[in-house]
Amino acid sequence: MEPELNGSSDFGGARFIFATEDGTISAWIPSVDQFNAILKVDHSSTAIYKGLTLASFGGANYLYAANFHGGVVEVFDKNFNPFSFSPTAFTDSGIPAGYAPFNVQAIGSAIVVTFAKQDKDKEDEVAGNGFGFVDVFTPNGVLVMRLQQGSWMNAPWGVALAPSNFGELSNRLLIGNFGSGLIAAFDASTGSFVSFLKQSPGAPMKINGLWGIGFGNGAAAGPTNTLFFAAGDANEHHGLFGTITAK
């Protein structure tokens, strides 16, 4: 399940919106039901949602969902109705067949989409060095750039932009790889690979089952230069939540 915090009054006033691998999207609206999320989208016959994010374009708020099974980024308007910016929105003809949107994340004024290799049933990712792509789009789905592809991509999922006070990786676009547990850093302007996030004495930091990464907000969610992560170790049988700070 992928939750997304909604800070607007759109989407029925939902506080949280949830996408599931069952192909559903639900909203927790306390003013309607304090104890249960309400089903808003049922695409269970065609979708396996792996990621979810919110962003705005042209003064309107939209919900973006990574449908891994269908191989598309689905977009919904403020009322949870399907929406299309264009037939080619959030597509990249340079990515080989057999890859599908694995996660979608709003970063500043951009939408970052990670792509992982599909298994034969198009249900789960296939891990392997070099198995992955990451694209940067405008909020209406126009391709801006593709991050440098290479062995550092391995079922990429987590996305975060480092602040200016995060040590050697300040201002870098960080991509967490579910397949390898490594966090790769890229030049946010050119998309070039820079290095892996490392731990003393210099070896790349590996977090088994790495999923989400994100920096604090400077308030209740922690310092802006602390990187938080969530992982599912032991083949996702265990959960781990932790922090990383730069030296």
Image (cartoon, rainbow, N blue to C red):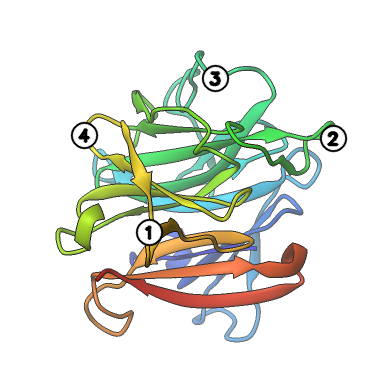
Crowding near the residue tagged with mark 3, few <14, some 14–19, many ≥20 C-alpha atoms within 10 Å = some
Q: Nearer the viewer, mark 1 or mark 3?
A: 1
Q: Is the Cβ of the residue at disc 1 closer than 8 Å to that at disc 4?
A: no
**Residue highlighted by disc 2:** 121
Mark 1 or mark 3: name the one nearer the start of the chain: 3
Mark 1 or mark 4: name the one nearer the start of the chain: 4
**Residue highlighted by disc 4:** 189
Question: Is 230 on the left or on the right of 70, as rendered?
Answer: left
**Residue highlighted by disc 1:** 202
> Of the residues shown, which amino acid type is indicated by label 2?
Asp
Quadrant of the rendered image containing residue 141: top left
Mark 3 or mark 2: name the one nearer the start of the chain: 3
Q: CA distance from mark 4 to mark 3?
A: 20 Å
Q: Position of residue 100 (x, y in %)?
A: 63, 32
Residue pushed farthest left?
Answer: 164
Mark 4 or mark 3: name the one nearer the start of the chain: 3
